[in-house]
């Protein structure tokens, strides 16, 4: 399969969901061609709402539609839609409204558009809300499965999507397990947990580490909330060291969730690899090098962590 952005896969899945379930509606903030809701609008104009650059209003309208029995997907750039936190908190999360908030253009992977367009704090923001599921698929197939799953999911949810294309890892028989992670590679020296675009860099890093005699497990966590605490603890017990990789701030995202979980269940040294500080404008590959997210940089960080967990942690905090 060809690489695809998860936003593209979402747009295709949304049309499929709309064709099979008349409850599905879409709301957009004047970015339909960017968040891939344009085709849904063409196919189902009576179930598509263009509300302009007014994300707070979009969220409020979506909550009302959900409370009326619809299944609204409201989409915008992640930094803009999650920036309407108070409306999401009161209108969606508090009411357990079946609103699917879709945030695209996440992380430094969006490249030259720069920090003002990058969703870098969105997972941290949404994780603070009770009742809010947080899902970050890593491939097109996983995104399609997650989107179809969300049609019947009970409660609010946040779906985090990339602008850049990502390689496919799964076949057509892939089944999405809400709240369940998956081990994609077995190892014994260290467990690397990736999510979204970070998973691909984690897999590349494991290959590099293997050539240097370091055996690394790699796990895919697509549901960051609720986290698969059992799998995370199992990896910690079997490997003794855990590394998280995400294109998101290291504060409050996947690394934060894993660290919180292990502190209560199985404390082990943890290295969080992600964005520290604000994002920058540049070529996506260059930015992944700049922020230590490329497979080579992840491998170098993990190697140092395996050799001296305490020093690696102190060096990065």
Image (cartoon, rainbow, N blue to C red):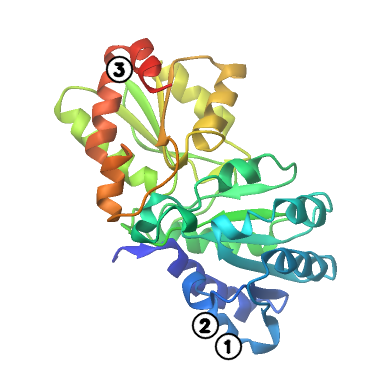
Q: Using the image as rendered, state which of residue 42 and residue 108 is in the foreground.
A: 108
Q: Position of residue 65 (x, y in %)?
A: 79, 71
Quarter placement of the C terminus: top left
87 up-or-down from 305: above or below: below
Please tell me which of labels 3 and 2 falls first in the chain.
2
Name the residue: 51% across, 37% down. Answer: 254
53 up-or-down from 218: above or below: below
User: What residue would you read off at disc 1?
Assistant: 43
Q: Mark 3 touching mark 2, by CB under 8 A?
A: no
Name the residue: 44% across, 56% down. Answer: 174
User: What residue would you read off at disc 3?
Assistant: 306
Judging from the image, what secondary structure is the residue with disc 2 in?
A: helix
Cα separation, mark 3 vs mark 2, equals: 48 Å
Q: Where is residue 212 in the image (x, y as percent from the top left)?
A: 15, 25
| Left or right: 120, with 97 as reference point | left
User: What residue would you read off at disc 2?
Assistant: 39
Q: Using the image as rendered, state which of residue 293 and residue 115 is in the foreground.
A: 115
Q: Position of residue 211 (x, y in %)?
A: 14, 29
Q: Using the image as rendered, state which of residue 105 and residue 137 is in the foreground.
A: 105
């Amino acid at each position: 399969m060809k690489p695809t952005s998860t936003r593209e896969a979402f747009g295709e899945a949304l049309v499929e969901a709309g064709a099979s379930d008349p409850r599905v509606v879409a709301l957009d903030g004047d970015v339909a061609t960017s968040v891939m809701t344009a085709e849904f609008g063409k196919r189902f104009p009576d179930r598509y709402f263009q509300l302009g650059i007014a994300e707070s209003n979009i969220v409020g309208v979506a909550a009302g539609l959900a409370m009326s029995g619809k299944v609204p997907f409201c989409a915008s750039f992640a930094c803009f839609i999650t920036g309407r936190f108070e409306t999401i908190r009161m209108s969606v999360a508090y009411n357990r409204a079946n609103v699917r908030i879709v945030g695209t253009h996440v992380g430094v992977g969006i490249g030259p558009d720069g920090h003002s367009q990058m969703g870098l704090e969105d997972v941290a923001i949404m994780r603070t809300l009770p009742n809010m599921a947080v899902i970050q698929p890593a491939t097109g197939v996983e995104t399609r499965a997650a989107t179809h799953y969300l049609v019947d999911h009970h409660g609010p949810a946040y779906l985090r999507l990339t602008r850049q294309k990502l390689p496919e890892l799964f076949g057509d028989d892939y089944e999405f397990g809400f709240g369940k992670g998956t081990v994609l590679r077995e190892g014994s020296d260290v467990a690397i947990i990736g999510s979204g675009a970070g998973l691909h860099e984690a897999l590349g890093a494991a290959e590099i580490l293997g050539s240097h005699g370091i055996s690394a497990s790699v796990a895919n966590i697509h549901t960051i909330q609720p986290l698969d605490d059992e799998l995370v603890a199992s990896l910690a017990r079997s490997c003794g060291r855990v590394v998280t990789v995400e294109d998101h701030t290291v504060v409050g995202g996947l690394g934060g969730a894993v660290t919180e979980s292990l502190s209560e269940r199985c404390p082990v040294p943890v290295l969080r690899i992600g964005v520290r500080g604000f994002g920058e404008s540049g070529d996506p590959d260059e930015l992944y090098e700049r922020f230590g997210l490329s497979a080579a940089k992840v491998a170098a960080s993990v190697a140092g962590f395996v050799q001296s967990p305490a020093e690696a942690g102190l060096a990065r905090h």
